[in-house]
Amino acid sequence: MTTAAHAWVLTDNADHRFAVANVEMVEYLSEATVLDVPYSPAYCPAVMPWRGRLLPVIHYHRLFDPQATAALKHIGVLAYQSHPGEPLQHVALVLGSAPYRVTVTDQESEALPELYAEAAYRPLVRSVFCHNTVSLPVLDVNYLISPALRDLLLKKPEAAAK
């Protein structure tokens, strides 16, 4: 029996393509006001006012290259839960282009792309599927905003210096 699910395909400013579950994509904004937060990690340097709250703004491409720069083009607001039954939380993700929705089946499953081979990035990917000959990792949004990822990324420069 084939199982089908819907997902949103997202692209960051470095043309990395990835997906999130259909229910995790809450809103797409072609314009947004962001406020810089001093001393924050390179991949999450700002917050954005949204529906009476301040959301962290994540630059996905900076997870892989903290020195990368790119203009703020689009924002996707994603929902996640820390634990089942808890209220939804939200995060803003900088996008390079408008997201689009696809239907995915079990037969489209793929191996983990090399970009995510490093230990810090493996938990970021729930699964991988192929769409139009491109391998698309499905992000674990909860891990994307987790202190565990932040701590691993903050340790990376120290590990490289040793």
Image (spheres, rainbow, N blue to C red):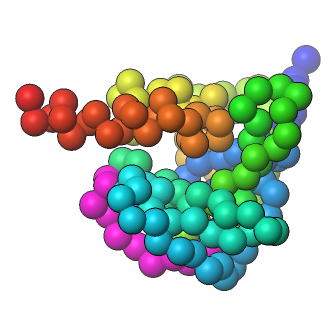
Q: Nearer the viewer, residue 52 or 18?
A: 52
Give x and y (percent) for residue 104.
Answer: 78, 39
Give x and y (percent) for residue 153.
Answer: 35, 38
In the image, residue 25 above or below residue 50: above
Residue 12 visible? The answer is no
Residue found at x 75% / y 69%: 50
Q: Is 20 covered by the magenta stretch?
A: no
Total count of labels: 0
Residue 80 visible? The answer is yes
Q: Quadrant of the N terminus?
A: top right
Residue found at x 67% / y 63%: 54
In the image, residue 120 above or below residue 25: above
* Quarter of the image where one finds residue 26: bottom right
Residue 17 in the figure: left or right of residue 149: right
Residue 58 in the figure: left or right of residue 159: right
Range of magenta residues: 65-75
In the image, residue 81 above or below residue 60: above
Residue 114 in the figure: left or right of residue 24: left
Give x and y (percent) for residue 51.
Answer: 81, 68
Q: Nearer the viewer, residue 2 or 34?
A: 34
Residue found at x 59% / y 58%: 56
Q: Quadrant of the C terminus?
A: top left
| Magenta segment, prevailing SS (helix, strand or loop) | loop
Q: Is 66 covered by the magenta stretch?
A: yes
- Considering every residue shown, the one lying at the far left of the view is 162
Give x and y (percent) for residue 3.
Answer: 87, 26
Residue found at x 32% / y 63%: 68
- Considering every residue shown, the one lying at the far top of the view is 1
